[in-house]
Image: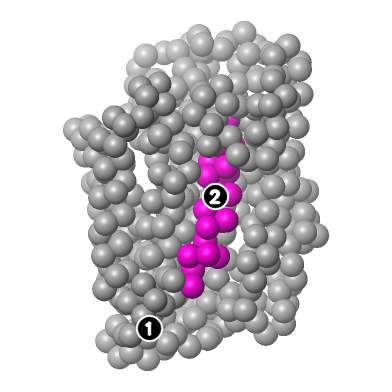
């Protein structure tokens, strides 16, 4: 994996925004929200609940989208000359302040409802190492959705160590990995027979090395696109493939197969949306409202379960839900309330703490090489006639990328 043969030299260029990926982040967050709204039985009316279940039965795979996206964006946006310490500091500044606020809020909620909390459980969650603990009350603890941040921290730790190898890898090896990684995701299901039965869910759904397969799938695809070697469908075809895969998986395909199929479908949509942004092609995902929703999606993801469970327990509707029209109204109310809280968290915690804690970008630093066009091997356009030019970052601007979270 160390040979430099056949590795095209990508030329540095002004940083290109990927707003379509930011917009898509909101769709993934909405899928997770809908899944949890269904599993919490907020809607008691069977007919209404059936609609939510049909739409969001695979919504948990939204986390899978985030993991694939994380690998893609972080490799695409890796900055030449950045040290490992700089990378790690930037990632901690991005996700830890929100996590700390929700960790404290969840402990307050537990105190209010007199829920016992073991200090060791709280400490594991605070340090984001809970995903390594197979005990159900430990990896799903405090703010339960933070298990995915525990996985992300593992990915962040590994990426600066692996990235130099990706940069030097031959194209044939990268394409082999694009094929092999989905097969390894599929292989997790028979492999779970090697672990105790009560740990099998943890092994396939939580264990960081297992979930990192999705992250590395996105990372390898980003490296291929960075070199101008990625071959995939356009955004319209990729979206159609995703919809067809989603419908088929929800209706007829077993879970051990649809996880692999959706990983591939998500990858095709992510790469097609990124390519549309880089080349200035039309994309429905970079409208201003969708981009804002994508920007607050990380905060939305962190608050939504805690808010819904707390309100349902406080009102006495936990486990029973709301009858008639009150059920869909409650789901819509939760959606809006969580958006308001997410907007506040993004505005007053996430953004200012990123400015305070993340290292300042050096003026003129180029982060993303412009991909080379497959047909000519020369630098591709940053925009086309009738489209907005690629944004050039200002010194200290940290909002350039469609961040993985």
* Cα–Cα gap, marks 2 and 1: 28 Å
In the rendering, at what x and y percent does residue 75 appear? 49, 67
Q: Which residue is mark 1?
A: 4
Q: Which mark is residue 239?
A: none
Q: Which mark is residue 154?
A: 2
Q: Is residue 377 above or below residue 272?
A: below
Which residue sits at x=26%, y=73%?
172
- Residue 286 sits inside the magenta stretch: no
Q: Secondary structure at mark 1?
A: loop
* Colouring scheme applied when the structure was drawn: one colour
In the rendering, at what x and y percent does residue 142 appear? 65, 27
The region drawn magenta spans 144-164
Q: Can residue 28 be seen? A: no
Query: What is the crowding at mark 1: few (fewer than 14 residues within 10 Å), some, or many (at least 20)?
Result: some
Q: Is residue 158 left or right of residue 62?
A: right
Which residue sits at x=31%, y=40%?
188
Q: Secondary structure at mark 2?
A: helix
> Are the two marked residues, 2 and 1, in contact with CB atoms closer than 8 angstroms?
no
Q: Can residue 220 be seen? A: yes
In the rendering, at what x and y percent does residue 397 appear? 70, 70
Which residue sits at x=32%, y=77%?
170
Q: Is residue 397 above or below residue 42?
A: below
In the rendering, at what x and y percent does residue 219 appear? 43, 62
Splitting the image into 4 quarters, where does residue 204 fall?
Answer: top left
Which residue sits at x=42%, y=87%?
9
User: Is the magenta region chiefly helix, strand or loop?
Assistant: helix
Q: Is residue 271 left or right of residue 304?
A: left
* 374 or 320: nearer the viewer: 374
Query: What is the crowding at mark 2: few (fewer than 14 residues within 10 Å), some, or many (at least 20)?
Result: some
Q: Is residue 244 left or right of residue 8?
A: left
């Amino acid at each position: 994996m160390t040979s430099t043969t056949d590795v095209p030299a990508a030329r540095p260029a002004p940083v290109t925004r990927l707003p379509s990926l930011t917009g898509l982040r909101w769709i993934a967050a909405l899928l997770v929200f809908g899944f949890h709204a269904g599993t919490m039985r907020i809607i008691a009316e069977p007919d209404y609940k059936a609609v939510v279940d049909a739409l969001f039965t695979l919504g948990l795979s939204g986390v899978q989208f985030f993991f694939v996206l994380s690998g893609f964006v972080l490799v695409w946006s890796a900055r030449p000359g950045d040290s490992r310490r700089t990378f790690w500091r930037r990632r901690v500044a991005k996700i830890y302040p929100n996590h700390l606020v929700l960790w404290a809020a969840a402990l307050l909620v537990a105190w209010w409802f007199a829920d016992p909390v073991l200090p060791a459980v709280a400490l594991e969650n605070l340090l984001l190492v809970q995903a390594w603990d197979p005990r159900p009350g430990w990896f799903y603890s405090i703010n339960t959705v933070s298990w995915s941040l525990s996985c992300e921290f593992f990915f962040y730790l590994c990426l600066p160590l692996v990235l130099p190898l990706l940069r030097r890898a031959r194209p044939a090896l990268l394409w082999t990995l694009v094929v092999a990684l989905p097969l390894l995701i599929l292989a997790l299901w028979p492999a779970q027979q090697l672990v105790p039965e009560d740990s099998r869910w943890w092994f396939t759904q939580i264990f960081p090395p297992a979930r990192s397969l999705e992250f590395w799938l996105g990372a390898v695809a980003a490296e291929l696109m960075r070199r101008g070697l990625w071959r995939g469908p356009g955004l319209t075809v990729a979206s159609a493939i995703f919809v067809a895969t989603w419908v088929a998986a929800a209706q007829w395909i077993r879970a051990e197969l649809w996880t692999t199929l959706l990983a591939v479908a998500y990858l095709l949509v992510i790469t097609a949306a990124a390519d549309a942004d880089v080349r200035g092609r039309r994309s429905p995902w970079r409208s201003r409202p969708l981009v804002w929703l994508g920007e607050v999606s990380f905060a939305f993801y962190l608050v939504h379960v805690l808010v819904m469970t707390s309100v349902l327990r406080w009102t006495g509707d936990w486990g029973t839900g709301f009858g008639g029209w009150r059920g869909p109204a409650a789901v819509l109310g939760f959606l809006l309330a969580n958006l308001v809280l997410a907007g506040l968290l993004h505005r007053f915690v996430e953004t200012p703490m990123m400015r305070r804690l993340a290292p300042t970008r050096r003026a003129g630093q180029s982060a993303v090489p412009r991909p080379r066009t497959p047909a000519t091997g020369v630098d591709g356009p940053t925009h086309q006639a009738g489209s907005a030019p690629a944004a050039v970052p200002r010194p200290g601007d940290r909002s350039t990328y469609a961040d993985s979270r």
